[in-house]
Structure formats: C-alpha cells, structure tokens
Amino acid sequence: MKTSVLKRFLVLSKRTRLSFLGVILSIAGMAQTYTTKADGNWSDPATWTGGVVPSVTITAGKTVVIQNKVTFDLNNDLIITGTLNILNDTLQFGSSFDKNIQVNAGGLLSISGGVILQDMTSHKNNLIVNGGRVAFNNSVVNISKGFTSSNGAFRNIRRTKVEVGENYSVGGTSSAVSIDSIQNSLIETGIAG
C-alpha cells in the first residue's frame, strides 16, 4: 500500500509541522536579493523592486543589485558581508557623506561596467576591504580618502580607472596575506592638503 508524502506530513503532530515550517521559512529568509528598478535614493522604496529598501548592512546571504543610478543618501557606513553588485550603472555618495564602505570576510563588492562616485574634494570616505573581495571590471571607482586591504582581502581590478584621494595600500600578515590583481587598469592617488 502506498502512502503519499502529503498524508505522512498531515499525520505528523502539529508541533512537528510548525517546527518544519519555521525551518523552511528561516532558510528562505536568509537568501534575499534586492534589485533596483529606477534611478533614485537608496532610502526610497520607489528605487527598489517590490518597494523593499535593503539595509546598509548587507549580511551573508543577501544580495543587492544596482542597475540604475542610486544615490546613497544615508549617513551610515555601508557594510558588506553579503554581495553588492553594480551592473552598468552608478552608486554615488553625496558631498555630506562622511562614512566608509567596508567589505568584510565573506563579502563581495562587484562592479561590472559601473561606477562608484564619492566626492573627491571631501577626503572623508574610505573603501576598506577587511578580508572580503572586490572585483572591478570595465568600471570607474572614485574613493575620496583611502582604499585599503587587510586580513586576507582580495582585490581584482581589470580595465578599470580607480581614483583615490589619499591612500592606496595593501596590508596583511604572513597568515592572512592580502592580494591585488591589477590588469590593464589605472590607479591614481592624490595627496591630501
């Protein structure tokens, strides 16, 4: 005699079914993608598909895809331990933005045919790769203060122009070596003051 999966599921106790449902919902909630649908401010629901604004802390399992011109209008650090993809468009920061972009272990900042713009005259903002990864391909990246890597970070820069206001550095230790791979790219650094 054959018993269907549905019948077996219904035979389980209510508590077991609720526990199973909770596990499924928590797994589904971990992996989430936010995608732009229009030009606009990061904090504006009209910028994002479904009207849901992503957090400024992009955690593991979360992906933010920017394929329109987005202005980061919040006064918070942008922390990436998930994935931020900028595809053929722009993430720009206002002149009053005085926080950092930080890519931590497990995080990825990927720009393909896109642009990151920070106000170069402010010398306030850093792009810190702290054990995470960045991949720039056919892009333009303006960082107003420092572009640093440490703790086993990996930066892959291909056919990209990177302008840094003050400091470009590669750091690490013998046990956590940071690596830069630069191909057919231009990196310009300035001196503050």
Image: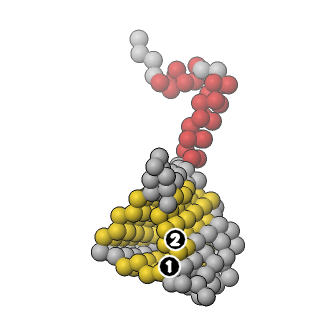
**x and y percentages locating residue 27 in the rendered image:** 55, 41
Identity, as a three-letter code, of the amino acid under mark 1 = Val
Q: How many marks?
A: 2
Quarter of the picture holding the C terminus: bottom right
Residue indicated by mark 2: 147
Between 26 and 106, the one lying in front of the other is 106
Question: Which residue carries the number 1 mark?
Answer: 164
Q: Is residue 24 above or below residue 105?
A: above
Is 64 left, or right, of 125 in this rendering?
left
x 47%, y 24%: residue: 5
Q: Is residue 19 visible?
A: yes
Rendered residue at 58%/47% (across/down): 29
Tell me, yes or no, if residue 117 can be seen here: no
Position of residue 12 relative to residue 141, above or below, is above
Query: Is disc 1 in contact with disc 2, using a CB cutoff of under 8 Å?
Result: yes
Label 1 secondary element: strand
Note whether 169 is above or below 192 in the view shown.
Answer: above
Instruction: Report the disc number at residue 116.
Output: none
The amino acid beneath tag 2 is Phe
